[in-house]
Image (cartoon, rainbow, N blue to C red):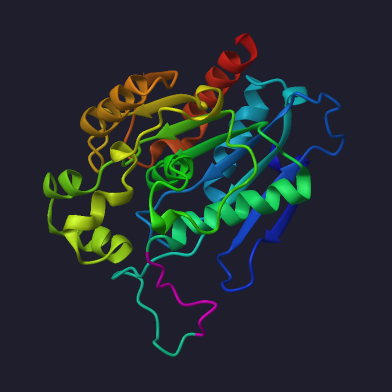
Amino acid sequence: MAESLIFKRHSYASDHELQSLATWEFPLPTADPSAYWLIFIHGGAWRDPTNTYQDFLPTINALLSAQSVPPAAIRGFASIDYRLSAHPNHPQDPATPPDKFRSAKHPDHINDVRLALQYLQSKYDIRDRYILIGHSVGATLAFQLLMGQLTTALSSPQIAEPLPAAIVGVAGIYEFYDFVYRHSAPYVTMVEGALGPDHSKWNDDAPLKASYAGLESGGPKVLLAYSPEDSLVDGDRETTAMADHLRADGIDTDVIFIKGEHDFSWQDGKQIATLIAEMHRKLTES
């Protein structure tokens, strides 16, 4: 279980307390140079402070318990926190210090993910030996990472290090405008809080609207998952459209159905562990 691992907290930038990440390593690190880091990006609609790096713990425990990925094939685990937007259900005193005040706007969230990966590269030399796992908007951020310099907003800070070997996107949001208008009013507030009030610009940096053709080595392998029981994100629309788009751009993409409500996959951990094991199998067989 995770308590048997060496746990560390790291700050990858100094502007905000949420610019931090956590790592878990085995007491005796694997000597296998082909082992992978498993790196998680939590969800929470860009704004929920109850979603943190700890959301990865159930999956870590499930992987260690089942050993569906051999421990020798895992270099370590990491989970990224990032600056959050304001949440109406979690108000803060306006006098809250800037390094604790949640007021992030796009592209703050993705830029923090970029900074976190740059930190991991410099600290652990992860190269392209990592699988990036994202839940909900964590999956959104994982694919925005691939978008590189397609837009001015995403061009700084740049990520010079290799992109991931694979991405596992779970219950992801890949298009913003139509997604919001298929749902209720709270979704408008949610997306405006992160992306701004100009609805016409929401999709400028939507993963579904980007081109992934021409990524080096054909881009990372991709595994997308969604649950038909998810009442928050309609995966039959979001995931199916994203999978078709990625395949059209030549990205090796599979889709797997999972069970349960929106947050069940990370709360339970077993299903995400199974997805990671499936992706590891694909990587080792390629």
Taking the image as shown, residue 194 lies to the left or right of residue 57, namely left
Is residue 79 shown in magenta?
A: no
Which percent across, then down, holds residue 240? 26, 25
Q: Quadrant of residue 277?
A: top right
Which is nearer the eye, 5 or 179? 179
Q: Quadrant of residue 217?
A: top right
Quarter in which the N terminus is drawn: top right
Which is nearer the eye, 256 or 161? 161
**Image: 24 above or below 249:** below
Taking the image as shown, residue 67 lies to the left or right of residue 111, namely right
Give the residue displayed 58% in from the left and 74% down from the top. 15
Which percent across, then down, holds residue 122? 75, 50
User: Which residue in the rendered view is the most extreme toward the bottom?
Assistant: 95
Give the residue displayed 58% in from the left and 34% down from the top. 164
Magenta residues, dominant SS class = loop
**Image: 116 above or below 217:** below
Give the residue displayed 43% in from the left and 39% down from the top. 143
Which percent across, then down, holds residue 246? 36, 26
**Image: 166 above or below 102:** above
How many numbered marks, from 0 up? 0
Which percent across, then down, holds residue 179? 19, 44
Q: What is the magenta range?
A: 97-105
Q: Is residue 14 among the parts visible in the rendering? A: yes
Is residue 98 shown in magenta?
A: yes
Q: Is residue 257 among the parts visible in the rendering? A: no
Taking the image as shown, residue 278 lies to the left or right of residue 67, namely left
Quarter in which the C terminus is drawn: top right
